[in-house]
Every structure is written in structure tokens, then in C-alpha cells.
Image (tube, grey):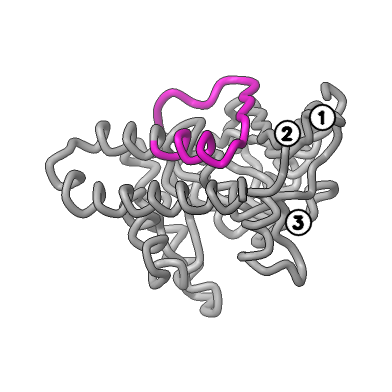
Amino acid sequence: MRAAFKLLRGFWHVLMGWVTIYFRFPQLTSQQREARVQAWAMQLLRIWGIDLEVRGKPVLAGPALLVSNHISWLDILVIHATRHCRFVSKSELRGWPLLGTLATGAGTLYIERAQRKDAMRMVKDMALSLRNGEVLAVFPEGTTGDGIGMLPFHSNLIQSAIEGDAPIQTLALQFVDTRTHSISMAARFVGDDTLLASIWSTLNAQGLKAVVIFGELQMAQGRNRRAWAHDLHQDVMALKQNCLSAQ
């Protein structure tokens, strides 16, 4: 019953977010919209009983590209709760009921993953956004992992920071069980896991905490995108290890 109640409250919160985007966002400044998105994300985490712990300092202002590992459908919500940023996401999300509207309202950039040439377009669009002082975010693994290890980083979108002459800030995500101080698998969304099953597992979890660790800003310093992606992968891995060792 507790999980069902969380689900109903969460659905109502999502619906109110949809209404806000349609009827309030047109009257708000970009700074006000960003603050609304962050507050909305924080409130949804509270509704679902998910604690949030932030270590390190997220970049205060752009330009910057956030680079993170990817574990769950919750990752975007968790990062938005720490600071607003524009995510790069698969184009299919735009057509999803309610969620597509929320993602678009939050400033999501959409990429056609099936078309390799679209990555080039996205790099140009991201570089322009970075030159305009925005904060963007990507998951270079390209898909979700198991929360223990990490998949290799794809380097295509890292090129945007090079072309936009912008710094990258690494961050590591981890979900932990506060009762056992170990990794929680409740929110994972990998392999054959279905979205509904993952949501239900998350809502049933007790003592679930999302931990976000921010690293330092870094420039390319002459590295090409592949070399930089390799180094970023190592940096995120180190942040993840710090997260686990501190539990």
C-alpha cells in the first residue's frame, strides 16, 4: 500500500509539473524556469522517499558539460535536484506522454541514436549552447549499467566541449541502502529490467539514498575527444570508489 500511495502522489506531482510547463513557463524567465525544475525534482524525490546526498560542489554557472555514469531512469531526476542542466537524450523520449513534455520543458536536447550523422549535428548544437554559457549533461556510457562497474565512455559528444572551449565537470552517481551501507539495486534499470518493474522496485525500497559526488572542472588541455573520454572515465570511476569507501 505504501508503494501504491507513493505512485499516486508521484503521478499527481508529474501532472502538476506538466500543467506548470504549459501554463506558467511562458511567463517565467529562464532562471525562474530552471529553479522550478530543480525544486520540482527535489520534491518528487521526497515524495518517493529517496534521500539525496551531494558531495563536492556543482558548477555555479555555465558554460560547462556535466559527465556522469548512468544507472537508472532516476539519474536525470537526481541530477536535476542538485542543479538544473540540459540533458542530451534519445529522441523517442519527446513522444512519451507527460514525460516528453516534462523533458522538453526542462530543455532536453534530442538526438536520433539510429542516425550516426545526427551525432555530428548534436555536437554542433551542444557547442553553440556551451558558447552561450549553458550547462549541459551527458551519459557517455550511452546506456545504463549495473551500478557496480562502468561501461566504456563514447567520445562523440565530448567533442562539443572541445569545440565550445568549455570545461567538463565529472560526477558520479550511486544508489545506496542506508540500512546496510551498501549498494542498492532497487533503482537499477539494466538488461531485461522493465521500466514499470524498476519503478515499483524503487517505490518499495526502504532506506534508499542517491549519492552524487561532483569532481573538479577540467579543460581539454590539448587532449582529443578519445583521450579526454578515457581520462573522464577514470575520473568518474575514482569518484564512485570514494562514494563506496565512505559508506
Residue 179 — which label?
1
120 or 10, which lies in front? Answer: 10
Q: Is residue 56 magenta?
A: yes
Residue identifier under label 3: 145
Asked if marks 2 and 1 touch (Cβ < 8 Å), the reply is yes
Spot the residue most to the left.
27
User: Which class describes the residues within 10 Å of circle 2: few (<14), some (14-19), or many (20+)?
Assistant: some
Q: Is residue 52 left or right of residue 100?
A: right
User: Which class describes the residues within 10 Å of circle 3: few (<14), some (14-19), or many (20+)?
Assistant: some
20 or 126, which lies in front? Answer: 20
Residue 210 — which label?
none
The percent position of residue 70, horizontal first and vertical second, equals 67, 51
Task: Identify the element where label 1 is drawn.
Answer: loop
Which mark lies nearer to you, 3 or 1? 1
- Mark 2 vs 3, N-terminal side: 3
Residue type, numbered disc 1: Arg
Q: Which residue is rendered at x = 57% and y = 53% of the image?
A: 4
Q: Which residues are magenta?
A: 40-62
Residue identifier under label 2: 207
- Mark 2 vs 1, N-terminal side: 1
